[in-house]
Image (cartoon, helix red, strand yellow):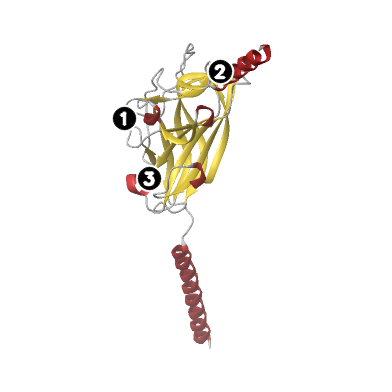
């Protein structure tokens, strides 16, 4: 009987640990606030109606006691359908926001990842193709905007969407707490979150898990056109070189004939 009782207690203990991870808001104190997110420029795209306000106690993460597990915050940008982009789109940086970052040592790691996904394909990690990434050490801050350099090229916006992911690796052992910046100001496409420890292993709209007001702030800064000549551009360059060579040859022959 004692063995059975001990076994039951162990099972309950394991179950309580497994269920400790939940999607919840930040419950601690906010430190010094940082700068507001920058205003989008002419070469920027966003799905946020309000990119300058970071709302307190608005975002959630998969965490236990505020210390987060692996969390992915994502947006899928329909470059052609929503933004009219038809040529290659070169990402140069990302403006995003932090509700609160509180690391045990004053900073913590964050990764920004860029992907393409075929137009019309289901939004799953298996359908993503990496085109660029950067790793950051984010200092403690709250209600702040941040600009991060990250580069990648969407070669065919007619057939490829852009996916941007802000990924925070498990911070429970290190004692890190992180909640991405968001507001309920409206968005043209959903914000997504994924956290396997909370049972969401694929990108899922924040509204679908009960947090429709968590509209993640992201502004992608880039340039349409990679600056590299297309095949047509190379052909024009070659044609110009050939024409110049022919013209030079004709002038030389005329000069020789004149001298004779």
Q: In front: mark 1 or mark 2?
A: 2
From this viewpoint, is residue 178 visible?
no
Residue 165's tag is none
- Secondary structure category for the residue under label 3: loop
Q: Which quadrant does the N terminus fall into?
A: top right
Residue 186's tag is 1
The part of the image, by quadrant, that contains residue 105 is: top right
Check if mark 3's residue and mark 1's residue have beta carbons within 8 Å. Answer: no
Disc 3 marks which residue?
78
Return the residue nearer the eye: 136 or 15. 15
Q: Position of residue 166 (x, y in %)?
A: 50, 33
Return the residue nearer the eye: 105 or 168. 168
2 or 3: tag closer to the N-terminus? 2
Q: Residue furthest right?
A: 3
Q: Residue at x 57, y 31 (%)?
A: 136
Disc 2 marks which residue?
16
Check if mark 2's residue and mark 3's residue have beta carbons within 8 Å. Answer: no
Neighbourhood count class around disc 3 (C-alpha, 10 Å): few under 14, some 14–19, many 20 upward: many
Is residue 52 rendered to the left or right of residue 176?
left
Q: Residue furthest bottom?
A: 260
- Secondary structure category for the residue under label 2: helix
Return the residue nearer the eye: 127 or 230. 127
Q: Position of residue 57 (x, y in %)?
A: 41, 17
- Secondary structure category for the residue under label 1: loop
Neighbourhood count class around disc 2 (C-alpha, 10 Å): few under 14, some 14–19, many 20 upward: few
Does 208 sit above or below residue 86? Answer: above
């Amino acid at each position: 009987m004692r063995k059975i009782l001990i076994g039951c207690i162990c099972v309950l203990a394991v179950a309580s640990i497994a269920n400790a991870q939940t999607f919840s808001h930040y419950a601690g104190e906010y430190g010094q606030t940082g700068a507001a997110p920058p205003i989008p420029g002419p070469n920027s795209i966003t799905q946020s109606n309000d990119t300058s306000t970071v709302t307190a106690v608005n975002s959630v993460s998969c965490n236990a006691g505020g210390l987060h597990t692996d969390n992915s915050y994502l947006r899928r940008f329909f470059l052609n359908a929503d933004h009219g982009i038809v040529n290659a789109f070169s990402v140069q940086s990302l403006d995003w926001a932090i509700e609160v970052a509180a690391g045990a040592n004053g900073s913590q790691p964050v990764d920004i990842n860029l992907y393409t996904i075929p137009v019309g394909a289901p939004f799953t990690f298996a359908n993503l193709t990496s085109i660029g990434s950067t790793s950051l050490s984010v200092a403690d801050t709250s209600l702040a905007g941040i600009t991060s350099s990250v580069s990648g090229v969407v070669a065919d916006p007619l057939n490829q969407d852009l996916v941007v992911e802000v990924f925070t690796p498990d911070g429970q052992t290190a004692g890190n707490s992180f909640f991405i910046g968001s507001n309920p100001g409206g968005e043209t496409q959903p914000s997504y979150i994924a956290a396997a420890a909370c049972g969401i292993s694929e990108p899922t709209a924040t509204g679908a898990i009960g947090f429709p007001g968590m509209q993640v702030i992201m502004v992608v800064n880039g340039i349409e056109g990679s600056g590299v000549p297309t095949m047509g551009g190379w052909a024009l360059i070659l044609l110009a070189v050939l024409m110049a060579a022919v013209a030079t040859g004709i002038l030389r022959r005329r000069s020789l004939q004149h001298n004779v």
